[in-house]
Amino acid sequence: MASRRPWMLLLCCLVAAGVVLQGRAQPDNKGFISIDCGFSGETGYVADLTKLSYVPDAGFIDTGTNHNISAEHVTATMAKSWYNVRSFGAGTRNCYTLRSLVPGLKYIVRARFMYGNYDGLDLRPVFDLYIGVNYWHTVNTSGPAAMFQILEATVVVPDDFVQLCLVNTGAGTPFISGLDLRPLKRTLYPEATAAQGLTLVDRLNFGPTNETFVVRYPDDTHDRIWFPYVDTVRWAEISTPQMVQTIDDDSYDAPSAVLRTATRPRNVSQNIEFYWSTEPTPTNPSPGHIIVLHFAELEVLRGNAVRELNVFINDKPWYTFSELSLRPVYLYDVPVHKSLPFQSSRYNLSVQATSNATLPPIINAAEIFTVFSTTNLGTNSQDVSAITAIKRKYQVSKNWMGDPCAPKAMAWDRLTCSYGAIGSRPRITGINLSSSGLNGDISSSFTNLTAVQYLDLSNNNLIGSIPDTLSQLPLLTVLDLSGNQLNGSIPSGLLKRIQDGSLDLRYGNNPNLCTDGNSCQPHAKKKSKLALYVAVPAVLLVVIVSVTMLLICLLKQNKQGSMDNSITPKIETIMSNSTLNNVGSDSSLRRLESRRFTYKELEMITNNFQQVLGKGGFGYVYNGFLEDGTQVAVKLRSHSSNQGVKEFLAEAQILTRIHHMNLVSMIGYCKDGEYMALVYEYMSEGTLQEHIEGTNRNGACLPWTHRLRIALESAQGLDYLHKGCNPPLIHRDVKATNILLNARLEARIADFGLSKAFNSNDTHVSTNTLVGTPGYVDPEYQMTMQLTAKSDVYSFGVVLLELVTGKPAILRVPVPVNIIQWARQRLAQGNIEAVVDTRMHGRYDVNTVWKVADIALKCTAQSSVQRPNMADVVAQLRECIELENGHSRDNANNGFYASSNSNDPNMSYDSYTTDQSTNVSPNNTSFEMEKCLMRVPTVPIGSAAR
Ligand SMILES: *[C@@H]1O[C@H](CO)[C@@H](O)[C@H](O)[C@H]1NC(C)=O
Ligand SMILES: *[C@@H]1O[C@H](CO)[C@@H](O)[C@H](O)[C@H]1NC(C)=O
Ligand SMILES: *[C@@H]1O[C@H](CO)[C@@H](O)[C@H](O)[C@H]1NC(C)=O
Ligand SMILES: *[C@@H]1O[C@H](CO)[C@@H](O)[C@H](O)[C@H]1NC(C)=O
Ligand SMILES: *[C@@H]1O[C@H](CO)[C@@H](O)[C@H](O)[C@H]1NC(C)=O
């Protein structure tokens, strides 16, 4: 597929000279390296389209020659970086070295090739590429000379550098046009591991009908290149101007610019079908495949419209979705991925509507990879640095490129390596540089080759004395220094090793070398004295410099220390103040008239927006302190935010008029020119989501009693919104991330940016756009676009399920499945244990868990009339808390908790009273009664705090 649009690559990589930069052999501030190979300029340039800086390749390689492609292949639209190549007529292996990387991090390595008859021979070479010591791909340039090839690998880099090596396989001279490196977030492409790299087969953007519409940096922050797959005959475009987010931005993170278009069959009864073909590679007869498909709904579905699809590969279902059918989520990407074994040379992929669907299938984007093994390890890194220093010092040419020992077939001439067990790095054990024209003294780097057994430096022009440090090489058995111009005497350490028979030292034919100790003494002494004179000032200088550095560091530290000192007491007073405020009541904060801040004041309050507390669609939330020391959270609207000015002002307006202990309170706002911000009370324990996930600061699991209390408090907040304020409000984005917790883990509903007022006499509000978060959106609202307070009830039901299960609203098992489906299925079998959060280790009253699960299921009933209202939910949750507290009290009265055997399940038999079974869910069976008897007593954590 890559070859079907060579001309397009021309356009996509359109680069023109702009600003001139200095060539640098290291990543830029984004971690990018963009190399124009064979570019003979001293300085690089900035590409017009991407604004990325391209540098010449001289800093990355010291072999090869530069050539311009022949004039007939240069076109007007062609990117400058294609004009020239570096080619490698000499040496089997030639390598680019990209440095200053982070070992263990994931990178995209992208190599670009266009032959362009640069050598005038019109012979299309075929050669191999290696990433480090692992075979990656064969480049075959047969085909038109003007054909472009872009090869992309995603690899975990084991060292602080990575090499791209071109290997001559006897089928023409290797060359390269360009080389890019892009760092990836560690979590992206989990299939790329230390043992396995990914080779891109294709990365497709579906929907655009303009073949030149290529998405890359800056729309894709990782500068992946997304080509449009255009088939205007069979497919029609669907698109949205809105931002499309990805649910799982940790794994594939497709950019909104790609996701906001999708394709559907023109003929609604047809499927979306495409194929790709693959071949075995020289090193792997059956390379596996990784496929990632991106689906996001871009249309608001009205009435009973259903879009539901299945994916088939070579006519076999990819997943049997059945009741877990894939329904694209509005404005959210649900990436689905699959690893395929190699089956055939051709894969047909088909996206089909299910029988329930009323709408044709869609697809937004696809990425297809093959895998290659990266299990070969490079030589021990200390050996590599030492031998590299030796190579540089003596200007050894030979074939000393790439890794010294690996792969075995390409190991450096004159080196002997040991390979050891699989998974261990090769070591250099022997060096034969006899008759190699070496000049200068014996490099101290030889001392660093600690696995060396055999070192032959005979018949060169080495001068100076023999370093005694060579005697420290533990395994060295043969050292041949004969036939050089060495002087001085044999150092004592080496003499000792000769005497104890552990070393065979050959030093004949060095006319100036004193093998008779006495006659050399004076000469040697003089020399060493001179060396001392030279050495003393040098050492002094070093000492002086170090002392100065130390002083500077100390001063710096002191300064920092004093700054800290001035801040620390302030924080302390702030803490005590706000604690006092909190302990009394929050009234002092709550009665504050909303204050208007200037942007300057916000800068001061947040100490120049130093500490980020969180991030949302609107931008960042920063930590801050008011003049009186009150800690606050400042939500600053970013200019690129998709939360508009309208939403921001709506939230400010709402918050100035509603006050409730379970709604987050606003202290003020800022509307200063283009800057907009809201200032809230500080909620030190973050979001409920973090606590459910266990990613909160202390990583502790929330005990059930806390969960119950948080549920009740959030419910009270929502009930107030629905009934208590005038006009009533529907929150529209109830979810675990919008429930914040303060230092005492008291819950407050936050983020009213989407809230909508409604007239309490009306049953619903009609809306034009669907808002909310996938997993939490009321299906009835989604279908009818009619909003009622029951939509919040539905979302709250999802939060309740999260509290019970400790799982997210959308589970990946491995197909994305809604928590409601997941829990309902298990609860229907009467199996509460299968859903309840195992991290609570059974420390809950099964009755209250059942009751909460039951409330959650009622809240998430398909039809809104069947759902309770928030007032009912509040009442029910109160009962749960009473039930739970009743238990704690009973148990405490029994002295149960005092028992050191309190974890012994047998002990809990006594504490169970059968009359409480009336509170369990109607789904309950006698089987559950058994379960109840087995429960572990509830630890009364938190009741004191109330
Ligand atoms: C390639 O072309 C550039 C610009 O025309 C020129 O400066 C450079 O010397 C040429 N390089 C070679 C190797 O011919
Ligand atoms: C390169 O590709 C051409 C045509 O695609 C093919 O005929 C040739 O065998 C390939 N060469 C190698 C060495 O794979
Ligand atoms: C396609 O896009 C390019 C630039 O992105 C534009 O110059 C061109 O006019 C577009 N072609 C059509 C047919 O819209
Ligand atoms: C699809 O339709 C069948 C029968 O028409 C029904 O049983 C099933 O529940 C539906 N599936 C979904 C996911 O709606
Ligand atoms: C020897 O190795 C050490 C540790 O890796 C390094 O700090 C030192 O610079 C090396 N010395 C030489 C001469 O290569």
Image (spheres, rainbow, N blue to C red):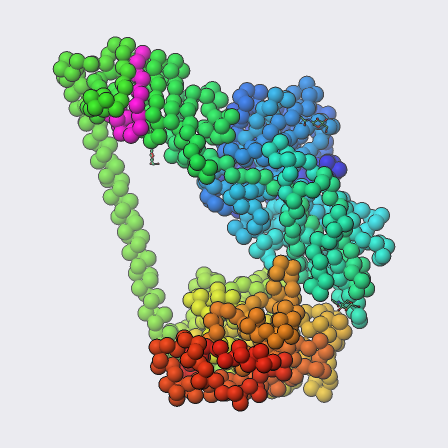
Q: Is residue 665 something that shows in the picture? A: no
- Measured as percent of width and height from the top left, residue 195 is found at 53, 42
476, 734: nearer the viewer = 476
490, 917: nearer the viewer = 917
Q: Is residue 527 something that shows in the picture? A: yes
299, 477: nearer the viewer = 477
Q: How many marks?
A: 0
- Measured as percent of width and height from the top left, residue 161 is found at 47, 38
Residue 733 is left or right of residue 596, and the answer is right
- Measured as percent of width and height from the top left, residue 300 is found at 75, 66
Whether 509 is drawn above or below 819: the answer is above
Per the image, is 472 magenta? yes
**In the rendered view of the protein, which quadrant contains the N terminus?**
top right
Q: Residue at x 44, y 36 (%)?
A: 421
Whether 164 is drawn above or below 496: the answer is below
Residue 726 is left or right of residue 697, and the answer is right
Q: Residue at x 64, y 48 (%)?
A: 339
Whether 310 is drawn above or below 62: the answer is below
Ligand 2 appears in which quadrant? Answer: top right
Q: Residue at x 53, y 89 (%)?
A: 915
**In the rendered view of the protein, which quadrant contains the C terminus?**
bottom left
Residue 224 is left or right of residue 528, and the answer is right
- Please tell me in which quadrant of the rendered image residue 78 appears: top right
Whether 802 is drawn above or below 65: the answer is below
Q: Residue at x 47, y 19 (%)?
A: 398
Q: Which residues are magenta?
A: 467-483
Per the image, is 873 magenta? no
- Measured as percent of width and height from the top left, residue 894 is found at 39, 87
675, 606: nearer the viewer = 606
